[in-house]
Image (tube, rainbow, N blue to C red):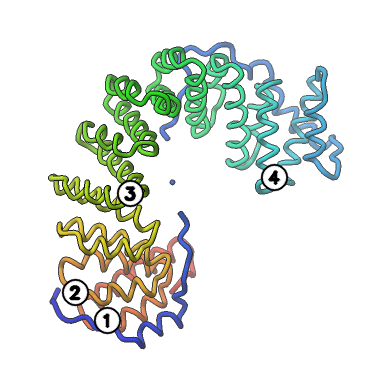
Amino acid sequence: MRARPYIFSVVTVAALVLTGWQMRSRRAPTATAAEASAPAATPRATSRAVAAKTAATTEMVAVPASSVNAVRRLLAATGTRSPAEWDDLGALVLRAAGEGEGAERSAWLVEVGAWAARHNVAWGLELSDRLEDFRGRATLVGALVETAAVIDPRAAAAWLGEVTEPALRDSAFQVVAAKWAEADLAAARAWATALAEPTARAGAFDGLMWSWAQRDGKSAYEWATAIKEPEIRDQVLLKLAKMMAVQEPQQALSWALQFPEGAARDQALHYAIFQWAAKDLTAAAEWSAKLTDPALRAGTEVAIARSWSNQGAEGATVWAAGIANPSGRSAALATTLRLWAETNPAVAAEWIARQEPTAANEGVFRSVTNALATTHPTATGVWLSGLADPAWRAEGARILAQRQREIAAKRPGTGG
């Protein structure tokens, strides 16, 4: 592209605002775990008929005006229940689940799950299978598993294979390992290590780090480095680095630098430097500038830019523009301006418009244009038409057309 002066008129800025480029608020994100290696007798084996009976008796149950309150009254009742009474209670919970919504629905599903953990795990697991939405199933099973793990983690570990939905099982292994480690780290570690299925073992190791890293990060790190499977080891080290980064980002950085080269090390470094920049921007930026590996330094600069942008995109952009390393500067600027484009698109567009259309700025221009075209396609078209450089106008038009095609493919009829 030619290095010509870049012209951006006041009229174009006004046009952007008038065509809808208004301030927007930016909204601030598992391998499937298999069943335990040697599970005890499964609780579902005692109540396989619950699901079928619940379906058969749903219409027979008299549902009060407030199903949730009715469920709570039944949960508070003491004494034994007949199979039919368990069926009726399940039917009522399902009816209430269909009536409720939002935070209140989640709150009483937590109550149901915790209650099931204390009284009838098999009933709770069968009931969760019949909830139609994933959020509801995750809420109920999450409360059931967490409560059961607090009561008796060894017993909870024995029936984890009964959680059949992959995403829920993955979380279940993590939760049980974390809760067990709080009570007995050695026993939890022995159980997790003995799991035969790699995905189950990885999930349990992940949960171990949640508890272990908070108590003794050094010994957790030494144990994690001895894991033989490279993929699982890297996953565990990454979780440990993230946990430590929240508490001691500088320590997490020093550990991450010792990881084997690869994606896990890079992610650990980026997360740690992000957390450090949130606490001390100057110190984090100075540390990053001293890195001798260009790729490593560029990656940490992008992480700092993201962290800084949370505190103010304009200041982060000014800092990114001053980065000496061309590749780091381009990547950091693309990050800050993309985030800036979400919070104040008109100002972000004006900033990029003042830059020379050089090869060094091409990546930044493309990133910003793509972000703007995604959220404000019509205004982006007006903005592009006011650009002085024909090469950037053409490239911007290409990006805008591509984004419009992608949007139309996902939501037919959507246009700029």
Location of mark 4 (residue)? 104
Location of mark 2 (residue)? 357
Q: Residue at x 84, y 35 (%)?
A: 61
Q: Secondary structure at mark 4?
A: helix
Location of mark 3 (residue)? 280
Q: Residue at x 24, y 49 (%)?
A: 299
Q: Residue at x 65, y 37 (%)?
A: 131
Nearer the observer: mark 2 or 3; the answer is: 3
- The quadrant where residue 260 appears: top left
Q: Vertically, is 393 above or below 313?
A: below
| C-alpha separation, residue under disc 1 versus residue under disc 3 | 38 Å
Say which amino acid is labelled 1. Leu
Q: Secondary structure at mark 3?
A: loop
Q: Are marks 4 and 1 in contact (CB under 8 Å)?
A: no
The residue lying toward the viewer, choosing from 223 and 405, is: 223
| C-alpha separation, residue under disc 4 versus residue under disc 2 | 54 Å
